[in-house]
């Protein structure tokens, strides 16, 4: 039975690219409380991005495959949710931001989703201004996202998701292409969002960068091998070295 304080509940999750193929995810079970920050880590190919797509409910839009199990977001089963309903519960920033940027200007990109929710114009503008200020994007406001650097695109993609103000936020390696200033902006923003009660799931290889997280999940070959408090994971040198996480 799910607790009212749980933002994400994953039960018996498995995923295959096709029915006769290997399991990309196998026997995944975990729960994340509202307001928690959880980092998912592990070597490339261990299933991190696929797990994020499953949690977000976007797996059916990005990959054909066989999925089983249950995913509950804020008490709602994702299997019965439409795209617009999912967008109100969870927002995801992809590893490759080019897959989610298509508007002619940064401002238009950030405003797009709130406009599609038919929010009042003044509320849309307020949200756009807030996320632009938060992420330091004022100089890029009228720029075409297509011509931005990889790091700038990640910031714009994050801003577009934040404009929807979802209670659950999923970030797939958003720090990887950012310069030191961009990383600082994102980390500060995540800390602020955590303080506001947002639930954050972040895929990251640089464990020290998100050491403020509550818990770390270590994936290996599609299975969870450790899910524990951050301080315990970072102190376990045997785990970090044998799994090549440092």
Image: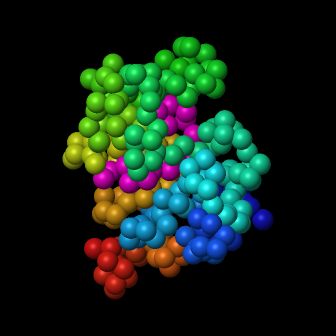
What is the quadrant of residue 186 in the picture? Answer: top left
Tell me if residue 67 comes above or below residue 246 in the rendering. above
User: Relative to the observer, which residue lies in front, 238 or 203?
Assistant: 203
Looking at the image, the residue that sits furthest to the left is 180
Image coordinates for residue 51, horizontal then vertical, percent: 55, 61
Q: Is residue 182 magenta?
A: no
Looking at the image, the residue that sits furthest to the top is 122
Tell me if residue 210 comes above or below residue 241 in the rendering. above
Image coordinates for residue 6, horizontal then vertical, percent: 66, 57
Q: Which residues are magenta?
A: 160-176
Q: Is residue 132 left or right of residue 16?
A: left
Residue drawn where x is 38% and y is 54% of the image: 173
Q: Quadrant of the N terminus?
A: bottom right
Image coordinates for residue 117, horizontal then vertical, percent: 63, 26
Residue drawn where x is 29% and y is 42% of the image: 151
Q: Quadrant of the C terminus?
A: bottom left
Residue drawn where x is 35% and y is 29% of the image: 145
């Amino acid at each position: 039975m799910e607790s009212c304080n749980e933002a994400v509940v994953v039960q018996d999750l498995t995923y295959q690219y096709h029915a006769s193929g290997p399991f990309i995810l196998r026997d995944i079970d975990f729960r994340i409380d509202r307001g928690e920050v959880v980092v998912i880590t592990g070597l490339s190919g261990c299933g991190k991005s696929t797990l994020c797509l499953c949690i977000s409910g976007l797996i059916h839009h990005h990959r054909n495959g066989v999925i089983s199990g249950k995913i509950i977001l804020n008490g709602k089963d994702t299997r019965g949710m439409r795209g617009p309903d999912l967008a109100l519960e969870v927002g995801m920033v992809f590893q490759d931001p080019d897959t989610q940027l298509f508007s002619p200007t940064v401002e238009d990109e950030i405003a797009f989703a709130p406009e599609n929710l038919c929010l009042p114009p003044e509320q849309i503008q307020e949200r756009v201004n807030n996320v632009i200020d938060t992420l330091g994007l004022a100089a890029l406001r009228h720029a075409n996202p297509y011509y931005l650097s990889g790091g700038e695109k990640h910031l714009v993609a994050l801003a577009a998701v934040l404009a929807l103000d979802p209670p659950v936020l999923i970030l797939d390696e958003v720090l990887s292409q950012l310069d030191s200033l961009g990383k600082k902006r994102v980390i500060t923003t995540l800390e602020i969002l955590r303080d506001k009660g947002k639930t954050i799931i972040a895929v990251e290889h640089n464990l020290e960068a998100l050491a403020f997280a509550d818990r770390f999940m270590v994936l290996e070959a599609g299975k969870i091998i450790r899910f524990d408090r951050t301080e315990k994971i970072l102190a376990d040198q045997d785990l970090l070295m044998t799994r090549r996480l440092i």
